Image (spheres, rainbow, N blue to C red):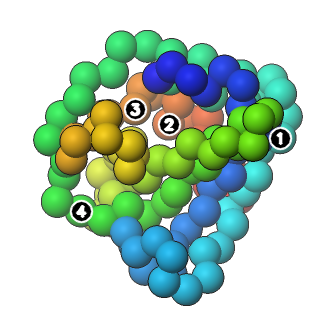
Amino acid sequence: MAGLEETQSIEIITFPEPGIQGDGPERAVAVITAPDEIQAIVRALDTELALAPRALCLEQYGLRFLMANGQVVSFGYACDEGGVFLRGPQSYWREMEVAPPGDFQELIARYMDG
């Protein structure tokens, strides 16, 4: 996934209800600021990821990649029914998603488990 190289921090959030963004307070699960951890996460996504049709489930988490220039790149992550995906609101996705690599899932899980 190109364009994440300038990430300064990564926020992991949950929604008031899975898949519903902006309707009530989001809850921060973690904020990743360690440069080596951020680079490892970004490197894990720097691979060919095949788009697949979007699963019929709601996003349980949101991942926000905050860039040095102030831009924020957001993704939905993990299914409320237990599946794991990465999807975004950008037109590129066109109602599709990817299965994130295992090493990415392991890195993110460290922060989701508290």
For marks 1 and 4 on the same chain, the one whose residue lies earlier in the sequence: 1
Q: Secondary structure at mark 2?
A: helix
The label nearer to you, 1 versus 2, is: 1
For marks 3 and 1 on the same chain, the one whose residue lies earlier in the sequence: 1
The x and y percentages for residue 25 are: 61, 82
Image quadrant where residue 7 sits: top right
Residue, disc 4: 57
For marks 3 and 4 on the same chain, the one whose residue lies earlier in the sequence: 4
Image height of 50 relative to 70, above or below: above
Mark 4 Cα-neighbour bin, 10 Å: few <14, some 14–19, many ≥20: some
Identity of the amino acid at label 2? Gln
Residue, disc 3: 100
The x and y percentages for residue 11 are: 68, 52
Image height of 25 relative to 36, above or below: below
For marks 1 and 2 on the same chain, the one whose residue lies earlier in the sequence: 1
Q: Secondary structure at mark 1?
A: loop
The label nearer to you, 3 versus 2, is: 3
Identity of the amino acid at label 3? Pro
Residue, disc 2: 105
